[in-house]
Image (cartoon, rainbow, N blue to C red):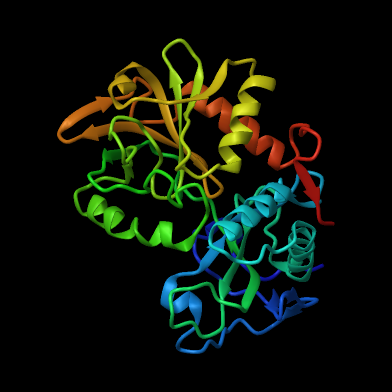
């Protein structure tokens, strides 16, 4: 298929409307067959459950063109499973995992002309989401829902190269114990908007949220998990029931162990041990790993030995190995790469 006339190498990380998207509706206790549509607009009643009580969950994943010309996605089965968990927590009907994979395949195939070519640095970002669609005025779950999946070509998260970030320890709490921090609900991201705007106004790139109960343990940022490298070369990530189980983070832990031969573990990480870390990164779908060079705790600067000029050596190896797997340059573990065409 002939590609769209897009300047792939100069794409930013923003929304570009593509030709097709997938839609399925839930009514009378069942999901309909679903279909591909050209209509990018959603019409809702003013009292729709999503508008009144934020009953919505979403996912994010990417489609890539590999070195040998195939179009693939990375571990979409884990996105499908996580969306089921998110929906159940908000009393929404789970969209079947096999239907999720089918929606991904149909949407990517329909928009194959928008999948950036290999080597361009760009990818096709996929956004599956679902929401309560019927009128709800009392505080209760909706009875009708819509699942949608759209896609948009995006450039690399870092335009002009990867530069280590400066982050601050936030006074805000991201999630409460036994709350919704471990699911991908829209409401979790809405509450982080004021914190990130104020961080930017003060010259910081992101927030580090601590556990709400004791404010002594590292949790995550508004949209990414933390990954640290200790001074003796061990990869560690925070363990908590109130952070999102990042697919990228889980993949990086396995890459560290199986590809790089490093020790890696998930454990509680305390704020007062950050000075003993050699490297820090934020991991997620958008950038894979965003390096952190400095953490500021209410005026106290914690400068990572990896510095403010480039990724630390271990973080760089992790990044290069995982992106190599995604792009087909390195053999992937079984089941990690889902071929679309």
Q: In this view, does 272 lie above or below 172?
A: above
Residue occupying image coordinates x 28% and y 34%: 214
Q: Which of 243 and 247 is in front in this view?
A: 243
Does the image show residue 324?
yes
Horizontal side, residue 317 vs residue 169: left or right:
right
Residue 168 located left or right of residue 38: left
Task: In the rendered view, tell whether residue 327 sits above or below residue 151.
Answer: above
**Residue drawn where x is 22% and y is 44% of the image:** 171
Q: Measured from the top left, where is residue 88 in percent x and y?
A: 60, 58
Which residue ends up furthest to the right in the rendered image? Answer: 341
Question: In the rendered image of this protein, does residue 159 appear above or below residue 258?
Answer: below
Residue pictured at 76% horizontal, 34% vertical: 332
User: Which image quadrant for residue 97?
Assistant: bottom right
Please tell me whether residue 103 is drawn above or below residue 30 in the rendered image. Answer: above
The quadrant holding residue 245 is: top right
Q: Is residue 59 visible?
A: no
Q: Nearer the viewer, residue 203 or 159?
A: 203
Is residue 331 rendered to the left or right of residue 154? right
Residue 2 point in image, percent of width and height: 78, 68
Relative image position of residue 251 (x, y in whole percent): 63, 35
The quadrant in which the N terminus is found is bottom right
Which residue does the image show at 46% across and 52% down from the upper left?
180
Q: Nearer the viewer, residue 251 or 144?
A: 144
The image position of residue 141, as x and y in percent, is: 53, 72
Mark count? 0
Q: Residue furthest top?
A: 232
Question: Where's the C terminus, which quadrant?
Answer: bottom right
């Amino acid at each position: 298929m002939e590609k769209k006339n897009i300047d792939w190498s100069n794409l930013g990380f923003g929304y570009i409307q593509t030709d097709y998207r997938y839609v399925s509706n839930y009514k009378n206790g069942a999901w309909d067959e679903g279909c591909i549509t050209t209509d990018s607009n959603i019409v809702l009643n003013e009292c729709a459950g999503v508008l009144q009580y934020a009953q919505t969950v979403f996912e994010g994943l990417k489609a890539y063109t590999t070195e040998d010309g195939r179009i693939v996605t990375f571990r979409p089965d884990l996105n499908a499973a996580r969306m089921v968990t998110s929906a159940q927590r908000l009393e929404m009907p789970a969209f079947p995992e096999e239907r999720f994979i089918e929606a991904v395949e149909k949407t990517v195939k329909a928009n194959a002309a928008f999948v950036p070519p290999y080597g361009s640095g760009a990818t096709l970002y996929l956004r599956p989401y679902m929401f309560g669609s019927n009128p709800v005025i009392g505080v209760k779950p909706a009875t009708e829902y819509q699942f949608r999946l759209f896609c948009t070509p995006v450039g690399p998260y870092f335009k002009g190269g990867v530069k280590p970030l400066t982050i601050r320890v936030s006074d805000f709490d991201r999630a409460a114990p036994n709350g919704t921090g471990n699911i991908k609900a829209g409401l979790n991201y809405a509450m982080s908007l004021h914190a990130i705007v104020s961080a930017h106004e003060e010259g910081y790139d992101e927030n580090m949220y601590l556990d709400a109960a004791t404010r002594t343990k590292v949790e995550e940022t508004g949209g990414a998990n933390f990954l640290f490298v200790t001074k003796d070369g061990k990869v560690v990530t925070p363990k908590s029931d109130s952070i999102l189980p990042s697919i990228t983070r889980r993949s990086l832990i396995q890459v560290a162990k199986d590809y790089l031969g490093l020790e890696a573990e998930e454990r509680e990480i305390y704020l007062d041990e950050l000075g003993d870390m050699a490297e820090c990164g934020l991991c997620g779908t958008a950038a894979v790993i965003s390096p952190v060079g400095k953490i500021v705790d209410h005026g106290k600067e914690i400068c990572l030995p990896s510095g403010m000029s480039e990724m630390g050596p271990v973080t760089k190896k992790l990044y290069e190995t995982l992106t190599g797997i995604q792009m087909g340059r390195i053999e992937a573990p079984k089941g990690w790469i889902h071929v679309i065409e």
